[in-house]
Amino acid sequence: MTTAITQRFTRRQVLGGALAAAGASAAAACVPEPPQRSVRRRVVVIGTGFGGSVTARRLAEAGVEVTLVERGRRWPAGVPGTFPTMFGVDRRVSWLSSTNSATALFPSVPLQPYTGLLERIKGDGMDVVVAAAVGGGSLPYHGMSVQPRGDLFARVMPGELDYDEFDRRWYPLVRAALGASPIPADVLASDRYASSRAFIEAVRAAGFPDARGEPMPIDWDIVRRELRGELPPNISVGDVIYGVNGPGKRSLDTNYLPAAEATGRVELLAQHRVSSIARDRNGRWVIPTERIDTDGVVHERVELVADALFLCAGSPNTTRLLVNAAGTGTIADLPDDVGRWWSTNGDLIVMQVLDHPTGTMQGGPASIASRDWDNPAGPMSLLFAPLPVPVDIGAMQTVAIFLPDGHGAFQYDARCGDAHLSFPASAHGASMAEARRRLAKLGRAAGSIASVDMTAAEPTTFHPLGGAVIGKVCDGFGRVLGQPGLYVNDGALIPGSTGCVNPSLTIAALAERNIARIIRTDVGTVF
Ligand SMILES: Cc1cc2nc3c(=O)[nH]c(=O)nc-3n(C[C@H](O)[C@H](O)[C@H](O)COP(=O)(O)OP(=O)(O)OC[C@H]3O[C@@H](n4cnc5c(N)ncnc54)[C@H](O)[C@@H]3O)c2cc1C
């Protein structure tokens, strides 16, 4: 139902996003007001990543009409030429920024801001890189879909979560939906994957537990066709973080999202950026959005008013919306812990240069890991992250995923009217030092003559978790405490670590579990 236009937006808000994105000055005050309207909806879900896709699909399958709001573009799945490549960077890599959001270590020419795939959120002590697209983090991610072991899950996840139930029900459900399976032996044995086999040997020589293929949401038959030369090399060379220019990767826009839309009950609003959230005096959720073009210019402001609001904008952006709502008072009585219990999932990336060739266009994506989980010096996973480099520079890129020592927090900064992340050095203290030791040992076993600590050079995480965690901000199923009809169902629920494994499988499994309960208990009562 469409109602009369409301005047909840200020002129500054209207112009701010578009002008900032376009790099224009505030003096350009004669830009016309975009039209605005207000619409009434039953359920709004913000974000189409793991949490949002699961939430929208299951609600719609249960008969609930859902409006699914996504700031990013809907890119065609698996189509050549859709994305830039690692060595052909252009404006499509970055979310409304003139620099390459993935890294400043390899400078590019200034980019004209665009609604590109990756957003860099700058913090004190840590930057965060997240996706902005229909399908969220499943577009740039490698896809390592690893289930943590029960004892590590219990160590880091909220006590409300029962590992046995996840093991029995939720992890298998998500693995099946993604079609995740490890690299087959014949693919691993092919020439292109020589660097993966060399990593496996180095792990053995260093005395770590044998490295193995982890479940990947990849159609390995497409990889085989690429290896036979029937398709151009895309997924098999792991050129993924700017998006994949061909078939083979089972991102969410190929499974959960089409299943949600097939119900006929999901209205997906792409290129709609949510600027804030509020609760009105009737207890309804008010969600101002800006419909933007690919330059970030606002063409329309659509205010959604809903009975239920699911925040699935990913850990930093869900947290931002909540911290800003608390800071500006648009939602009264939010829990004090909003913004806290945030961490990086314990990421360390080190590139080793070896004393021998390691091959060009190394077979990918990252799919091989050693589960060094019983090491008396602390549990950790050691991963091989192959590089799609056309020249053989003898590179072996390795990643450690450890248990962070502590947390950072997002806090409202009234000077800029936005939440800001502070991450203390102590949160990556002893565990990070141990991770460095272990990757150095691995490098020595592989014949390292030099190494570049990418994380020290540019402190960045690709695995943000927390900010609205279970037990502090939300109940055991993601209901925000004291706020009927407001839910969190994404990585923001998890207090900083998924137990030495990449987070997406656990985020999706948790979202499946939560929404199953919400459907049983809240549909028809709360909304
Ligand atoms: C380069 C890279 C590689 C990775 N590799 C792996 C891997 O191999 N394995 C693994 O498990 N994980 C990996 N990850 C991490 C993984 O992608 C994330 O953990 C996961 O996507 C988080 O899921 P989510 O549902 O919490 O949020 P997301 O998937 O980030 O989805 C959030 C969505 O909300 C949208 N959104 C945000 N703010 C707004 C707003 N204001 N208005 C409207 N929409 C909004 C975003 O555009 C996004 O689409 C990788 C991440 C990156 C960036």
Image (spheres, rainbow, N blue to C red):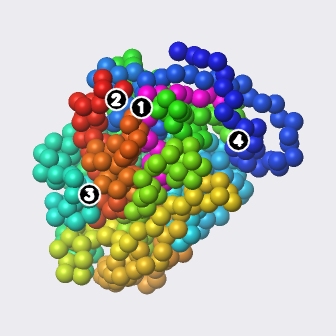
Name the residue that disc number 4 marks.
Answer: 13
> Which amino acid does the dot numbered 2 rest on?
Val
Which image quadrant is residue 358 in? bottom left
Name the residue that disc number 3 marks.
Answer: 158
* SS state under label 4: helix
**Image point 21% across, 46% down: which residue?**
171
Query: Which of the two discs, 1 and 3, labels the residue nearer the N terminus?
Result: 3
> Which amino acid does the dot numbered 1 rest on?
Ala
Q: Quick check: 347 above or below 53?
A: below
Observer-nearest of 391 and 111: 111
Query: Which of the two discs, 1 and 2, labels the residue nearer the N terminus?
Result: 1
* Eye-nearest disc, 1 or 3: 1
Residue 115: image tag: none
Residues at marks 1 and 2, CA–CA distance in whole angstroms: 8 Å
Query: Which of the two discs, 4 and 3, labels the residue nearer the N terminus?
Result: 4
> Within 10 Å of the Cα at label 3, are there few (<14), some (14-19), or many (20+) other Cα atoms?
some
The reply to whether the residue tagged 2 has its Cβ within 8 angstroms of ligand 1 is no
Residues at marks 4 and 2, CA–CA distance in whole angstroms: 31 Å
Observer-nearest of 369 and 527: 527
In percent of width and height, residue 100 lies at: 62, 57
> Which amino acid does the dot numbered 4 rest on?
Gln
* SS state under label 1: strand
